[in-house]
Image (tube, helix red, strand yellow):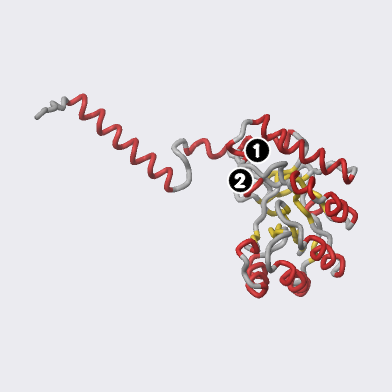
Amino acid sequence: MKFFILTRKKLILIAGCVCAGLLSAIFSLNGLGVFASGSKDKKIPIYRVDKKEKVVSISFDAAWGNEQTQTLLDILKEHNIKSTFFLVGMWVDKYPESVKAIFDGGHDVGNHSNTHPHLPQAQRDKIKSEIDDCNNKIEKITGKRPILFRPPYGDYNNAVVEVTNELNMHCIQWDVDSLDWKDPSADEMVKRIKSKIKPGSIILMHNGAKNTPEALPRILDMIKEEGYSVVPISEIIYKENYTIQHDGTQIPAQT
């Protein structure tokens, strides 16, 4: 059997380590990280826009299938609504005719990366190539280079936001998730969006979710009944002279 003699110096060292561990745990539980003071430097995408008027934006992420895209475009056209579609480069390769239909319909064509990776795990040059490659593909079809970028999975870090801004683009998230990807009923989607929208909201939907085509006309009717108008994200955001609050709200700079 071995015995360890704890000197006063060792006891102080152990106590210090325990305290450091407790502090680290506390910071982690609060989502602050060990170096909480660095949180003030966190870069935030645009989740919603500070608006006085009752206006919102609807966005669709397109990464995989394409069976419902034209149906959604027909519904939007019937309601005279322009929205925003965030397209993955691989999807653009497969469905160039749909890319053109989206653009010709007057909708924003946004960038959703080239291969839909987890970008915070990538180096800055990889982040840039993911955005640039998708931009090139979209521009080749539409003649217009996207100015809006939505990170895959809504997953970002400072580098993702910084590289997006360096490319003269706006990094876009959402503040209202329809959860259509979980296949809720049309009723559930309408109720959820109605309970969460406010002036300047950005709504997240998907082009391939099971019940989205059924829910979309009712969502558009509900939004209108609530006194809101719908515009593309490019029209709801401020392009310059703005700041982004800690909760992702984009606000115009004070003049």
Q: Give the residue displayed 71% in from the left and 49% down from the top.
A: 251
Q: Which residue is at 71% across, 51% downward?
A: 63
Q: Quadrant of the N terminus?
A: top left
Image quarter in which the C terminus is found: top right
Count of numbered tags: 2
What residue is shown at x 73% (from left), y 33% (from top)? 166
In the image shown, does 46 or 113 lie closer to the viewer?
113
Closest to the observer: 180 or 36? 180
Q: How crowded is mark 2: few (under 14 residues within 10 Å), some or many (20 or more)?
A: some
Where residue 202 appears, as percent x and y from the top left, is 71, 57
Q: Earlier in the sequence, mark 1 or mark 2?
A: 2
Q: Is residue 233 above or below residue 255?
A: below
What amino acid is found at the position of numbered circle 2 in the picture? Asp
Q: Name the residue under label 1.
A: 160
Q: Quadrant of the rendered structure where residue 65 is?
A: bottom right
Asked whether the viewer can see residue 36, the reply is: yes
Farthest left residue in view: 1
Question: Can you identify the residue that label 2 sits on?
Answer: 155
Q: Tell whether label 2 touches label 1 (CB within 8 Å).
A: yes
Q: Where is residue 81 in the image (x, y as percent from the top left)?
A: 84, 64
- Identify the residue at image location x=61%, y=34%: 122
- Which SS class for mark 1? helix
> What percent of the width, then of the height, locates residue 165?
72, 37
The amino acid marked with disc number 1 is Val
